[in-house]
Amino acid sequence: MIMMEKIYRQFLKSKEVFIDSRETCKGGLFFALKGENADGNKFAGEAIEKGAAMAIIDDPEYKSPDPRTVLVENSLETLQELAAMYRKEFRIPFIAVTGSNGKTTTKELMGAVLERKYTACTSKGNLNNHIGVPLSILSMKKDTEIAVIEMGANHVGEIKKLCEIARPTHGLITNIGKAHLEGFLDLEGVMRAKSELYHFLMDNKGDIFVNRDDELLMDLSAEAGRYTYGNDDHADVCTRLIDEDPFLTVQWKTPAGEFLIESRLYGRYNYPNIQAAIAVGHYFHVNPHDIAHGIRHYIPENSRSQIIETGNNKVLLDAYNANPTSMEFALDYMDRLRDTPKAYILGDMLELGNTSGMEHRNILKKLNETGATHVMLVGSEFTKAAQKTRFLSFQNSGEARDWLREHPLKGFTILVKGSRKIQLEQVLKEL
């Protein structure tokens, strides 16, 4: 405990935390974490040379006489404990966002709305796991008035652990679908894991934002203090989807009148994400005009729900994440498009465990039913599933890129979607 207090005092001086010795590190704390490909303990000396005030290691082999090198039992657990200690400095709303699909977009929309009224801290990018959540908390400035923290998981118990670190006061589950089945085993496992957020909030008298149109989420939150949104007139925040060509336009009814909110998001599957941001903004008394402004000016990036006009084609780029549920949503959106030739470049959906073959075949069956003619499949799972189909398949994105170079597409609306590790962004330059 004495060592932890020493680390905490040093953190309060610098407010800088690093896990990559290639960064500046000057004046901050370097945590030596073990990853799949590297052991951070090996780079503690480099961090000290770059001016780190402290390097926290958990391998005695790398302990040096330099007092700035601090040996602990577990560097990751120390990082998490440090974040939990710092979290206690804040008496502000902490909103946790999790779910199988849409959690990053929802989190960013909420941040865009809340920052119109508050000094808001929104977790950056995909910092949503056992490392990312502590780093997000430790990056918070002292003047933060409200925080939005994304929580991801691929095993039961992980959301519970993240809640113990971040101690959210409010929470939202976007949806529960087929994601990370390799770790969760089945949909029941996904439900148990995601609902850990509800259980924490119910145990600690927190409030939950719930999509009233989602029966499962309504059932799971039946005993909770909740604030609802949806198409239902009985929802606390009631909206209607007015248009989705090319972007979503949402009508929001309030006691003060109706607001028409034009977004820069495509696909009906993004509608609940917009609803959630409206509801959270309204709950925290953000002016309705500011809520509309925040949503209207949010432009997706990082290969999530992006529309890219290349000069030859319109590309719908959603290549940061893919699972059976989100893939079906995207195919449904494409199917509703009219008066445009359509093409599909789809990458493997990873972490599906024993269900992987079946889920990839199901996607191909759905593609067949739509009558899709221009289809390229990328990755070993889709390649196996496509053996008896008319669709083109490639082992990797490099092969697909090379094929497109020789067989260019022009005048198409092209869906590019797959798991991040497939790196489908490699094909963009040929579209």
Image (tube, grey):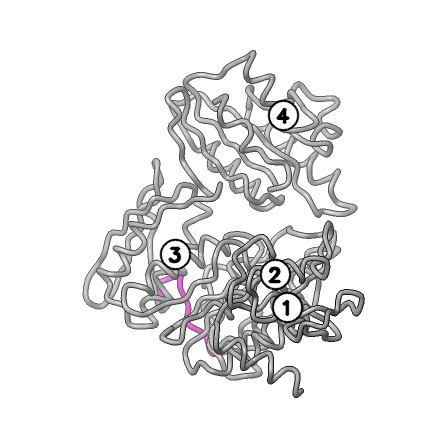
Relative to 421, is 145 on the left or the right? left
**Residue 69: mark in rendering:** none
Which is closer to the viewer, label 3 or label 2?
A: 2
Q: Position of residue 206 (x, y in %)?
A: 49, 79
| Dominant secondary structure (helix, strand or loop) of the stretch shown in magenta | strand
For marks 4 and 1, the one nearer the N-term is 1
Say which residue appears at 45% left-offset and 63% top-offset. 212
Front residue of 80/100: it is: 80
The residues tagged by marks 1 and 2 sit, at their Cα atoms, a distance apart of: 7 Å
Q: Which residue is mark 2?
A: 47
Amino acid under disc 2: Ala
For marks 2 and 4, the one nearer the N-term is 2
Compared with 147, 2 (above or below) is: below
Q: Which residue is mark 4?
A: 398
Residue 232 included in the magenta stretch of the image: yes
Say which residue appears at 41% left-offset and 60% top-offset. 276
Asked if disc 3 and disc 4 are in contact, CB closer than 8 Å, the reply is no
Compared with 330, 345 (above or below) is: above
Q: Which residue is mark 3?
A: 109
Q: Which residue is mark 1?
A: 55
Q: Residues within 10 Å of mark 2 (few under 14, many from 20)?
A: many
